[in-house]
Amino acid sequence: MDKDWPLYEVFVRGKRGLNHVHVGSLRAPDDTMALRNARDLYTRRNEGVSIWVVPARDITASSPDEKDPFFAPSGDKVYRHPTFYDIPENVPHI
Amino acid sequence: MSFDNALGAIAEDNDEARWAFGTGFHDPLAGVDTAVPDGVDRGDLASYCLMLGDDALIMSHRLQEWCTHAPELEEEVALANVALDLLGQARLLLARAGVAEDAVEEARRGEDDLAFFRDAAEFRNVRLTEVPNGDFAHSIVRLLLFSTWRLALLDRLRASRDPVLAAIAAKGVKEVAYHRDHAALWTIRLGDGTDFSHARAQRAVDELWPLTGELFGVHDVERRMADAGVGVDPSGVRAEFDAVTSEVLATATLRAPEPEPPRLAGRSGDHTPALADLLAEMQSVARAHPGATW
């Protein structure tokens, strides 16, 4: 048996935040305790109103080796970027 | 919204509402109307606040002793959080005791006087809070028994005729509900875990259970405060304590011993030698440098 508890990634939604944001990781014996640990580790200073915990092993991540084929081709597609518009000041979160 | 750092990303500019600013740090009851309601005996109210405050203070200290010793980093922070919650309750209750025992403001003892300059026999905490830490299971089972009992008390204390006590209880209920939940989850995992963890958890239950009789003994002060609508009669929370603990222990496959007869010990200042040892450490700095601030 692995002596270490499994690793979890923690996502917190702030009081007025729109989406959950990755804030860090922790170890816990199971999902329920991971949520408790996240509460104790990452919301001590009034940061959050909602927490997600995800077992790190369940996250499929892109690899640094694939950086160029993955991301470089989008760099010069200027027509995909909404830079031709004036954004009204009273429209938040764009 | 910045994604450069995690805290910045979940907070927003000018998000000052999330910070607990330092006002009132030196006086836990700053800004509160601390007048004692008409017809309430000041001496009894002071003694009663000391009982509940000392429970929180001593329990907090035992939990603080886990700092740098907890089995996992995550659990260390969790236990420290619980300890800090209880220390906050102790500060409020000791400050309330100081106000109640002396109507003259200048003559009052403050929270520090009460925490650091009383001897063991003057403390009113139950013995369950003072016995030394054992292994992790011991502390978890102690926290389960203590917070189950305290949550039941605070829940009823919210209806106190003393508005300060009622407000302290209302704040404490939210905190202690989490403590009980944390302890229950761990008790279930230890009891229904491996043979080794089960044996440790059962040993903790067997060791700590004899101290539960004291939770339901009714001191004269508690009886008078309950009759006056200010305090809670601890004998009245026994059914809730038994129901919660028996459910958790059964789920954890642990055996609950027979109910202990109610008795008085710590509430009358009758403590184990462990309390004097605890106080010697807790009070040493304040007594070596009286009046010092930092």
Image: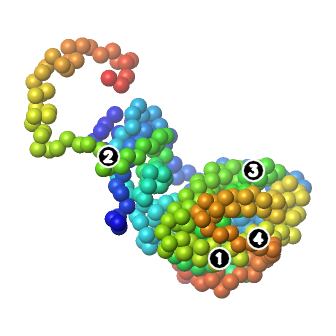
Q: Would residue B203 appear left or right of B95 to someone viewing this image?
A: left
State the residue position of label 1: B206
Front-most of residues B142 and A40: B142
Q: Secondary structure at mark 2?
A: helix
Which of pointers 4 and 1 lies earlier in the amino acid sequence? 1
Q: Are marks 2 and 4 on the same chain?
A: no
Residue A71 position, x and y percent, is: 14, 33
In this view, the mark in front (3 or 1)? 1
The chain that hosts pointer 4 is B
Mark 2 is surrounded, within 10 Å at the Cα level, by few (under 14), some (14 to 19) or many (20 or more) other residues, namely few
* Cα–Cα gap, marks 4 and 3: 27 Å
Of the residues shown, which amino acid type is indicated by label 3?
Answer: Arg
Q: Which mark is residue B259?
A: 4
Of the residues shown, which amino acid type is indicated by label 4?
Answer: Pro
Q: Would residue B32 appear left or right of A60 to someone viewing this image?
A: right
Mark 4 is surrounded, within 10 Å at the Cα level, by few (under 14), some (14 to 19) or many (20 or more) other residues, namely few
Of the residues shown, which amino acid type is indicated by label 2?
Answer: Asp
Q: Would residue A15 appear left or right of B237 to someone viewing this image?
A: left
Front-most of residues B283 and B218: B218
